[in-house]
Amino acid sequence: MGAASGDRIHRRGARVLLVSHEGAERRLLMVRGHDPHDPGRYFWFTPGGGLEDGETMRAAAVRELAEETGHVLLADELVGPVWRRTAVFDFASRPYTQFEEIFVGLHSHAVARAQAEAAWTDIELETIDEVAWLTERELREAPIEVFPAPLRESWTWFLEWDGVTRDLGEVDE
């Protein structure tokens, strides 16, 4: 977590685009959740979250992936960061500003080792509704919000990443 400036919480976070090439279509592992203070607001988001003290972005990304989904990757198996962004959002009636780096991981690497038990925090238990593999089309056509929003566009650029991290700037969610 980060320090609050006024009531706003400022923190650093890391996320993972876990890609599966198994089956007829590529899929991303996504989490569907809702805001406990706005129960009608549902959204898909990538596994990830805030850094712990002294943690690197890569370490946080693999820790959060394992905690939220049970899929275990090693930090050096992550590609990227493919995206950087500053997400400005409200959650549980608290305003956040989160600087994020987003990495790509392959499901084929995770299946090579035992799956961990997901270890959800109390707030995750209250707000996570589903963890699911979604196709490009399913995310593009999702009737609820998708974070980060560029996941509604073509995935080719991060699946065939050229080594250049894209800066998405500041985004309001």
Image (cartoon, rainbow, N blue to C red):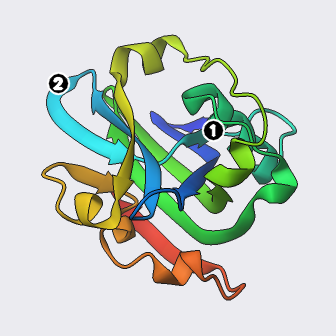
* SS under mark 2: strand
Q: Is residue 46 left or right of residue 82?
A: left
Label 2 with label 1: CB-CB less than 8 Å: no
Q: Relative to 93, say whether 96 is above or below.
A: below
Q: Give coordinates of residue 147: x percent, y percent.
A: 37, 55
Task: Depth check: give the residue in front, 65 or 12.
Answer: 65
- Would you name the residue on which mark 2 appears? 39
Q: Which mark is residue 91?
A: none
- Which three-letter amino acid code belongs to the residue tagged 2? Pro
- For label 1, the crowd category at 10 Å Cα-Cα, with few meaning under 14, some 14 to 19 and many 20 or more, is many
Q: Is residue 64 left or right of residue 54?
A: left
Rendered location of residue 92, percent (x, y): 33, 26
Task: Quadrant for residue 64, please give it.
Answer: top right
Determine the residue positioned at 67% across, 32% down: 66
Residue with the most extreme top position: 122
* Foreground tag (2 vs 1): 1
Q: On the image, which quarter does residue 124 sit in?
A: top left
When the figure is inspected, residue 161 is found, relative to residue 137, above or below; the finding is below
Q: Nearer the viewer, residue 44 or 99?
A: 44
Tell me the residue that label 1 is attached to.
Answer: 65
Residue at disc 1, secondary structure:
helix
Q: Amino acid at mark 1?
A: Leu
Looking at the image, tell me whether mark 2 or mark 1 is earlier in sequence order: 2
Q: Nearer the viewer, residue 71 or 53?
A: 71
Q: Which residue does the image show at 78% across and 52% down from the upper left?
A: 58
- Residue 100 percent location from the top left of the image: 59, 56
Residue 144 position within the rendered picture, expressed as x and y whole percent measured from the top left: 18, 48
